Image (cartoon, rainbow, N blue to C red):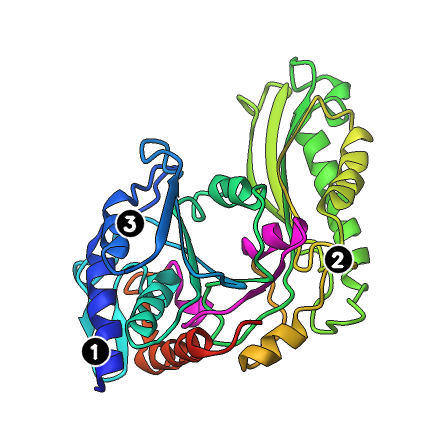
Amino acid sequence: MNTLMQSTMTHLQALVAIDTQNQNGNADASRLFEYVTQHLPGFDIQQCGSADQGELTLHAWRGQPDLLVNIHVDTVPAGPHWSANPMELQINAEKAVGLGACDIKGALACWLAALEHSQADHAALLLCSDEEAGGSRGIRAFSQQPNTYQLALIAEPTLCRAVSAHRGYASAELTFSATAGHSSEARALQDNAIHRTSRFLSATQALALQHAQKFHPQYPDLSGICLNAGRISGGRKNNIIAEHCELSLGCRPLPGQPADALLNEIKALAEAETVSGWQVLAADPPLPATPEATDVSPLLQQLGLPAGDPVSFWTEAALFSATGIAAAVCGPGDIAQAHTADEWVALSQLEQMTQHYLRILNGAPL
């Protein structure tokens, strides 16, 4: 193992050992930020947010960089099926196993190692601690601030390929109501909250099938809206007409497709069943956020990053794009290993990403 990889693994071991599990938006990244700050010589540091609310961001810059590297440092909670301590990095000849090793502390280890071995006068890093809980409060607040970055490179597991397009994410919670009564009443077939919900779900499935025939003209591998009913709850007993039913669902619009427009289509179907409650939980844009967004391809080619295919999962790159900053997603590891027991990242991926970061740090400004 060469010195650059040794440095990467040293950082990854330290980062994995710091617990940043995000249970319910409560990840505490303060210790991890202290570790990172110690390895940022000559950087200006701006830290915002509250550790108590799991909403910390760390913005570090040196010189006048055009490129911002963004990495979230929180992880999902460790499940019960880990074969070893998830906070203790296990390394063998091919991979490194540990909570967050793939998603996405590995990228931070790569960037810190590359910085140590670079001659970079200009560099910028943005860390956030609330990506896994949803809401992305830190990035939303940061993206509203004035800045001069030409490109934001968001770290997520993409096999070290630069992804310039992905789906958006929209979700809502619906409540259907009816009048309780004895199940022997003839009206139970129509005036039943669960039945209303069932008819609505049938309508949304038909809508999803219509969208499935629509392929994105630039990304032919992407079609449809990935509709998913995630939770349903209602009723009291089999012999009582259900007076209440709650449903949560999500969908994923195509790049360039507004999330709120898709939600309006779904809401219209709910209103046909006299929905009594409608709450939008998320309406996050795709990447690029609009058809008019800056084409990042020339910038990615200038950085020497191999192009990746569009993906269906959502990232915070879309929030940068929505505010006019060109954005792409690139990081080590495979999304198939994220959020799993014995989460791992291939050593070859870490080496490749460290080399990418080193080349970028040593390169000319965009």
Element type at mark 3: helix
Tell me the residue that label 2 is attached to.
256
Q: Nearer the viewer, mark 1 or mark 2?
A: 1
Res 167 seen here:
yes
Q: Residue at x 60, y 53 (%)?
A: 320
Q: Quadrant of the N terminus?
A: bottom left
Q: Which quarter of the figure has residue 35? A: bottom left
Q: Earlier in the sequence, mark 3 or mark 1?
A: 1
The span from disc 2 to disc 3 (Cα, nearest Å) is 35 Å
Queried whether the magenta region covers residue 322, the answer comes back as yes
Res 227 seen here:
no
At which x and y percent is residue 143? 56, 46
Q: Are marks 1 and 2 in contact (CB under 8 Å)?
A: no
| Above or below 20: residue 64 | below
Element type at mark 1: helix
Q: Residue at x 45, y 69 (%)?
A: 331
Tell which of 343 and 187 is nearer to you: 343
| Above or below 166: residue 263 | above
Tell which of 251 and 353 is nearer to you: 353
Element type at mark 2: loop
Q: Earlier in the sequence, mark 2 or mark 3?
A: 3
Q: Are marks 2 and 3 in contact (CB under 8 Å)?
A: no
Q: Residue at x 62, y 42 (%)?
A: 249
Tell which of 51 and 173 is nearer to you: 51
Tell me the residue that label 3 is attached to.
33
Q: Amino acid at mark 1?
A: Gln
Q: Amino acid at mark 3?
A: Phe
At which x and y percent is residue 99? 28, 59
Q: Tell me where the magenta segment starts and ends, as one range.
A: 314-339
| Above or below 274: residue 96 | below
